[in-house]
Structures are given as structure tokens and as C-alpha cells.
């Protein structure tokens, strides 16, 4: 079997098809043909195994969609096993997860009866339901109040790890944050609000938000600390909160810091022994203590580690012994490679992971938070590619971009999103920019700013072809790319005024803020609750002259907002067609739904297209839209398609 062939495994009338590692324009036609050959055998059930598929673009989506249509016509059920593969996100964005049934793995598909054959489900006892809701509280609090992601900076590698208190796994007041500043430095913070439980966690979140806002708007660190102290004075739950704040300037390695009733930072290097910086002597926040600042210079490759006292104040150890233990473990973490690469992607990750795991594993009572940053001087990497507009160029450019991105170590979701978005744009240029018989090139320029903002420009010198809204499962590449990055902009190279737009070439610019994960230890999430009865979420797309239309029904909340965004962008072809959205059958509209509508409006505005919203007069949706600054159109307008 070659890398482009599908492995087929039969089990009675159920067949499992193992899909290729990559599905794109280069092999999508072959995949479609091979799936059709399997369907011609008329099995009862097919499971397409994509759990090991690393990449799938809109051409691959079309291949699966065609197979779904063919299987439905022949009476065969097509299922898809996705697991944790990046393909799951593509299926969600294009709405394909609403066309085929999706499973965690092949075994789950094999074990699940066909529709109409399922045994009646027995509801869980009330006590179990209450326990599940209780277990869900802590992860929700942590996810809401602690940063789930950290900035990716070319000259500073940052990592963090948080572990909840051992007793009752209670959410506590320890916290951390890393905030890129406009002038180039990055602010690093670890703090501790007294107490445990929801009240302490809420106070911690409030203090973190205030400091974040102050740091972004105020260049003077002493002023930031003074205003934070005044803020904490007004709230009893924040008084005597401790804080260590350090601002690292990646341009020269300067570290300015202050300790407010908190342990001082630890500097760790492979070239010399770990050493604790002197504390600056200021008291905790909310006590009226004047801020005191100090400054040091890091050596290239050196780490600064911020931590909460839960890491050093442990049973049967004095505070001095706890600090000595931390210095030794941190030194060993930098020198030793004992943590597998998959568990600790960078040396900063290894430093946070080993210090928390080894010290907390010996016994602890309080929350534990660590935040590490390594100074890595040198120019930010750039990528420049220019290749012929041929099919092989798509994979070649994607693999070059993959290697370049790996140097930055972004969040896996960001990494997958950027590869997908860039592949879609390059594929469009290769397939559509140059007429048959005319040669041309595709150029790619990628860079990342000092604040971690990724920018990629893909340029062709061919002819722009507008998406055809009448062809199903086509023209989704632009939609997919626009959905997975922060900003997508299509521009045309300068041309004669009389020529149609895009006759001299097109520039597509992608922008995305890079982040990487912070590790938050929390109890396992409970099984999702059964959906409440009512009108199900649904989007019906169509056309009304030159405009795209979408009729939305059911709830628009956090559980449906991503699906709404993907399907609206699919309807308007990534923002290139005007869009009319009928919300008169929407049963619930929350801030998540409003945010999605704003995102769609911005994408349409970038292409000078209009978003029209329809809502029933006097309905909650109309009121919410008006409050949010998204007023609905006249109620006398007819529903779209």
C-alpha cells in the first residue's frame, strides 16, 4: 500500500477505511475514487478512520462530502472517527460534522448501533447528577479566571503551570499571568490572594484583570503598583494580597521587578548556580506600602522563575529548606533531560513541570503556580518562499511553514490553524490564479513581531476568480482560512482603472496572535449534560439575488457560536458576498452569539460587504442586538430563502 492508498478492513457488513495522513488537492480525487470503490460493494456501514490524519483541507472535505452523498443514496451509513486530530476543527467549520456522524475512535463507531436500534437510555440517579455538577465547578472557575494561553515571543520563551490545592481540590487565590506590552517588553506576574474557594478565586480574577489593564495603559511600573495597591485597599478580600511582578525587555535582557510581600524571583542557568534575586522590600497590596523596584540583566539563555509560596512552604520543611529545595530542583530541571519531549516541549516547560511535580509530589497544602521565561536574544525568524504555481508547491510550502512555525512552538491549535489557512490560500492560487497553459509563481512571506503577532502574505500575479456560490462544497477554502485566523484580508495588485479587479494579481494577508498553552491541573470534566428540549440549533443557507442568506433557529450561545460562525462564513464565502441573517427563530441569544455576529460583520466590512440582521419586533433578540450596537432591519422584510 502506498501513502496515497486507503487501507480497508472488513468486519461482516461493516468496513473500516483508514484514511491517508494528508488529504488535500493533490490526492483528494484519488481518495474520492477509492471511497466510491468501497461503496460499490454496498456495505451496511462504513467508518472512515481519520484519527491518524494530520492534515485535511477543503478539498478533503469535498471528498468526504461526496462519499456521504453517495453512501446515503445507496443505503449505506457513513461514519467518521476523528479522535483529537486537527481534522475535527475543519469538519466543524465547514458543517460536515452535521452531515456525517462523528465518533471519538473506530471502536466507539463499531460499538454504536445504527439509528433506530439504540436501547433506551436510563437516566443517572439524581445524586450522581448533583455530584457531576459539583465536580464541574472547579474547572470552570480555573478556565475563566486563569490564563489558558501564554504569549509566543521570538526572544522570550514563556511557560506556566498551576496545580490546585490538595485539600478538596479547592480553587484558591494563587494566580499567574504574562502580558506583552506595546513597547516590546513582557510583564510576568505571580500572586496570591488569601483563602480558598470561590470567593478567593473571584478576588484573584479581579486583581489579575485590574493589573492586566494597568500594565497595558501605563508605562511606569511604580505607577502601576501604586494604583494596584490603592485598588486592593478598597476591597477587604484583596487586602494583603502578595505579588511578584517582573518586566522583561527581550531587546537587551533587562529585568525590572518588584516583590510586594512575595518571594523573590529565581534565576536559573546552565552556566552557573541558581540564585534568588534580593526582595525589594515592599509590603503586600492593599496595605499602603510604597512600591520599590530593582533591576538586573539576564544572560543569554538564562531563565527567570516566578512562583507562589505553595511550592516552598511544605510539610516538615522550613521556608529556608523549601527555597533550597526549589533551587536544586530548578537547576536539575535545566541540566537534565528526564522529561519526555512530548510532556515538556521546551526547557521553560521542563522547568515549570519538574519543579511543580517533584516538590508538590512530596506533599503540599496550598495552590501552586509557577511562571518561567527564558531570554533568547537574536532576530525574529522570517520565512521567504517563491515557487512555481504547481500542485506539488502546496505541500512543499506547507512543510516549510511547518518547520518554521515549530521553532516558535505555538499552541497546537494555532499551529494547525495557520497550516490549514495558508494551505487553503496557496491552493486557491495554484488552482485558479493562472489560466491553463500560462506559468506563474506563488510567493509566501511569513514573519512574527516582537509581540508575537504572526503575519503571512501570499502573492500571485494571475487573475482573481470570485467564488461561485452556486457550486456546493466549493469555494470554502477562503471561508475556512478566514475562520481559523484572527484576520484575513484580500487585496489586488495595482492595475489599470478599466480592468476588472484582480487582473494583475492578488495578495492575501493572514494575521494571527500566537499563543502557547499554560498547564492548569484540574479534576476530569464530567460527561456533558443532555441538551434541554426545545428547537434545535440549525442554519439553513441560501441565496437572494447577489446576497447570501442564512435562517438561524434554536439557541445561539457558547455551545453553538463556533458552528454559527463557520456556517455563516461558508454562506457568504468568507465575507465576499453580502449576507442576510434571519434570527426570528432564535430561542436564545447570549454574548457568545453576539460576539460571533460582530466577527462576521467585521469580516464582511473588510471586503466592503453588508450584514443585514432580521429579528422579530419586541423580541429578546431584537433588544439584545440594539444594546450591542447591532440593530436589526425592518420587521416587514421577508425571511430569506
Image (tube, rainbow, N blue to C red):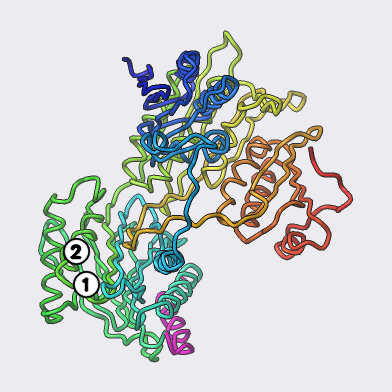
Which quadrant does the N terminus fall into?
top left
Tell me if mark 2 has few (under 14), some (14-19) or many (20+) residues whose alpha carbon lies within 10 angstroms of its own: many
- The x, y position of residue 386, in whole percent, is 44, 25
Which element is circle 2 on? helix
Rendered location of residue 474, percent (x, y): 61, 26
Which picture quadrant has residue 222? Answer: bottom left
For the question of whether residue 33 can be seen, the reply is no
Is-magenta flag for residue 106?
no
Please indicate, yes or no, whether residue 359 appears anywhere in the rendered image: yes
Helix or strand or loop: what does disc 1 sit on?
A: helix
Please state which of residues 24 and 259 is positioned toward the viewer in this rendering: 24
Q: CA distance from mark 2 to mark 1?
A: 8 Å
Q: Which mark is residue 241?
A: none
Q: Which residue lies under the disc numbered 1?
A: 311
Q: Residue, x 35% and y 49% (percent of image)?
A: 154
What's drawn in magenta, residue-wise?
A: 219-237
Image quarter of residue 328: bottom left
State the residue in front, 56 or 240. Answer: 56
In terms of secondary structure, what is the magenta stretch mainly? helix
- Residue that numbered label 2 is attached to: 355
Residue with the most extreme right position: 636
Question: At x 17% / y 72%, what residue is drawn?
Answer: 363
Look at the picture and state if 10 lies above or below 235.
Answer: above
Residue occupying the far top of the picture: 437
Q: Are the residues at dot 2 and dot 1 in contact (C-beta closer than 8 Å)?
A: yes
Q: Is residue 163 above or below residue 198?
A: above
Amino acid at each position: 500500500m502506498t501513502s496515497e492508498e486507503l487501507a480497508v478492513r472488513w468486519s461482516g457488513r461493516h468496513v473500516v477505511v483508514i484514511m491517508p495522513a494528508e488529504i488535500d488537492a493533490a490526492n483528494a480525487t484519488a481518495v474520492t475514487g477509492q471511497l466510491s470503490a468501497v461503496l460499490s460493494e454496498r456495505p451496511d456501514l462504513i467508518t472512515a478512520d481519520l484519527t491518524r490524519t494530520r492534515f485535511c483541507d477543503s478539498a478533503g472535505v469535498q471528498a468526504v462530502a461526496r462519499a456521504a452523498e453517495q453512501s446515503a443514496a445507496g443505503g449505506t451509513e457513513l461514519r467518521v472517527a476523528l479522535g483529537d486530530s486537527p481534522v475535527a476543527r475543519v469538519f466543524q467549520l465547514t458543517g460536515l460534522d452535521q452531515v456525517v456522524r462523528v465518533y471519538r475512535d473506530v471502536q466507539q463507531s463499531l460499538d454504536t448501533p445504527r439509528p433506530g436500534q439504540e436501547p433506551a437510555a436510563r437516566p443517572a440517579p439524581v445524586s450522581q447528577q448533583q455530584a457531576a455538577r459539583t465536580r464541574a465547578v472547579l474547572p470552570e472557575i480555573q478556565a475563566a479566571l486563569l490564563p489558558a494561553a501564554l504569549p509566543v515571543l521570538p526572544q522570550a520563551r514563556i511557560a506556566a503551570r498551576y496545580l490546585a490545592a490538595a485539600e478538596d481540590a479547592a480553587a484558591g487565590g494563587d494566580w499567574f499571568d504574562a502580558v506583552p506590552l506595546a513597547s516590546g517588553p513582557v510583564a510576568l506576574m505571580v500572586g496570591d490572594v488569601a483563602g480558598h474557594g470561590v470567593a478567593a478565586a473571584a478576588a484573584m480574577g479581579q486583581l489579575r484583570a485590574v493589573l492586566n489593564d494597568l500594565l497595558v495603559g501605563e508605562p511606569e511600573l511604580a505607577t502601576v503598583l501604586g494604583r494596584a495597591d490603592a485598588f486592593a485597599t478598597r476591597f477587604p478580600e484583596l487586602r494583603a494580597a502578595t505579588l511578584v511582578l517582573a518586566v522583561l525587555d527581550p531587546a537587551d535582557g533587562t529585568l525590572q521587578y518588584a516583590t510586594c510581600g512575595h518571594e523573590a524571583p529565581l534565576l536559573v542557568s546552565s552556566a552557573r548556580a541558581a540564585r534568588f534575586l534580593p526582595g525589594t522590600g515592599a509590603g503586600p497590596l492593599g496595605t499602603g506600602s510604597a512600591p520599590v523596584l530593582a533591576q538586573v540583566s539576564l544572560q543569554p539563555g538564562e531563565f527567570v522563575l516566578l512562583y507562589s509560596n505553595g511550592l516552598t512552604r511544605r510539610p516538615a520543611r522550613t521556608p529556608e529548606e523549601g527555597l533550597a529545595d526549589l533551587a536544586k530542583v530548578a537547576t536539575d530541571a535545566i541540566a537534565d533531560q528526564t522529561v519526555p519531549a512530548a510532556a515538556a516541549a521546551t526547557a521553560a516547560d521542563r522547568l515549570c513541570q519538574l519543579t511543580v511535580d517533584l516538590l508538590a509530589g512530596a506533599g503540599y497544602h496550598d495552590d501552586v503556580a509557577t511562571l518561567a521565561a527564558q531570554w533568547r536574544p537574536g532576530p525574529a525568524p522570517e520565512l521567504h518562499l517563491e515557487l512555481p504555481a504547481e500542485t506539488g508547491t502546496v505541500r512543499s510550502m506547507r512543510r516549510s511553514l511547518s518547520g518554521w512555525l515549530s521553532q516558535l512552538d505555538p499552541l497546537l491549535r494555532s499551529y494547525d490553524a495557520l497550516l490549514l489557512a495558508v494551505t487553503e490560500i496557496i491552493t486557491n492560487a495554484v488552482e485558479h490564479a493562472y489560466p491553463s497553459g500560462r506559468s506563474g509563481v506563488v510567493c509566501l512571506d511569513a514573519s512574527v513581531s516582537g509581540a508575537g503577532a504572526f503575519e503571512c502574505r501570499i502573492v500571485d500575479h494571475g487573475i482573481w476568480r470570485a467564488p461561485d456560490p452556486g457550486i456546493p462544497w466549493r469555494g470554502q477554502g477562503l471561508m475556512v482560512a478566514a475562520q481559523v485566523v484572527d484576520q484575513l484580508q484580500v487585496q489586488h495588485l495595482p492595475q489599470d482603472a478599466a480592468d476588472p479587479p484582480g487582473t494583475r494579481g492578488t495578495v492575501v494577508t493572514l494575521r494571527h496572535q500566537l499563543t502557547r498553552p499554560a498547564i492548569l491541573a484540574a479534576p476530569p470534566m464530567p460527561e456533558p449534560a443532555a441538551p434541554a428540549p426545545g428547537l434545535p440549533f440549525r442554519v439553513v443557507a441560501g441565496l437572494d439575488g447577489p446576497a447570501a442568506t442564512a435562517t438561524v433557529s434554536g439557541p445561539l450561545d457558547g455551545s453553538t457560536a463556533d458552528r454559527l460562525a463557520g456556517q455563516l462564513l461558508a454562506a457568504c464565502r468568507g465575507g465576499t458576498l453580502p449576507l442576510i441573517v434571519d434570527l426570528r427563530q432564535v430561542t436564545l441569544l447570549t454574548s457568545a452569539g453576539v460576539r460571533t455576529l460582530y466577527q462576521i460583520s467585521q469580516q464582511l466590512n473588510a471586503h466592503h460587504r453588508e450584514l443585514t440582521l432580521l429579528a422579530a419586533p419586541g423580541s429578546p433578540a431584537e433588544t439584545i442586538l440594539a444594546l450591542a450596537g447591532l440593530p436589526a432591519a425592518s420587521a416587514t422584510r421577508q425571511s430569506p430563502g
